[in-house]
Amino acid sequence: METTAAPAVTREVERILRVDHAGEYGAIHIYRAQRFIARRFYPDIVSEFDEMLAHERGHFRRFDEILRRRSIRHCYALKLWALGGLLLGSFAALLGRNAIWVCTYSIESTVLHHLGWQLEFLDLHDREVFDAVQSIQADEEEHRDKGLKYGTSPDAHRCIFWVVRRATEFAIWLSTKL
Ligand SMILES: [Fe+2]
Ligand SMILES: [Fe+2]
């Protein structure tokens, strides 16, 4: 279904596409940085990041294709999210193996919360974008569950969890404005 709805609905669908596209771009850079550091310090978890990176690249391509086809501009801050993703991913990875997974759990659980309300909205207004968002949900749940399974949450990592959650929420909020 094309976005033939009221302008406010069309704008909201465009915002969702832009945010998700930017989010996937950021996720690619977070996991690239983590994979890079893991290769040197925690080689046993590199294959997990290969798999997650492949998922995030696929998600990005899906949103990128829809944005291009509908002639919707991407988020102006895309390059900033790449840089932010590299910094956040490196920061967490340098704090240790557990921090990597706590960071993953924090990002993915925050993202899934947003996908939830997006799906409720899109279900009523845009079938194609609904299908795109729904298609990434299972992968993001798998990433969140990996983070929960492999990461532990002693006090030091609870702090990382909240810092990453706030950073992710801020990035999502800013992506709706830029
Ligand atoms: Fe993703
Ligand atoms: Fe993910």
Image (cartoon, rainbow, N blue to C red):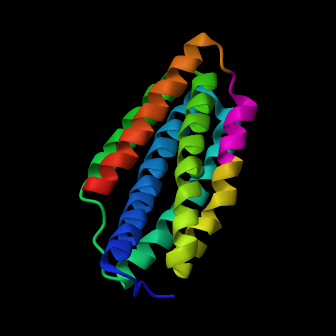
Q: Quadrant of the C terminus?
A: bottom left
- Work out whether residue 83 or residue 18 is closer to the camera in this orientation and state it: 18
Magenta span contains residue 15: no
9 relative to 178 in the view: left or right: right
Asked whether residue 58 appears in the rendered view, the answer is: no
Q: Nearer the viewer, residue 87 or 157?
A: 157
Residue 139 is situated, as x and y percent measured from the top left of the image, at 67, 56
Residue at x 62%, y 67% (from the top left corner): 134
Residue at 59% of width from left, 58% of height from top? Answer: 54
Residue positioned 63% across, 23% down in the render: 98
Residue 101 pos. (x, y %): 63, 32
Read off the magenta span. Answer: 143-152
Q: Is residue 128 above or below residue 117?
A: below
User: Which one is nearer the viewer's eye here, 131 or 99?
Assistant: 131
Residue at image coords 43%, 32%: 166
Residue 147, magenta (yes or no): yes
Say whether residue 78 is left or right of residue 142. left
Residue that lies at the very extreme toward the right in this rendered image: 149
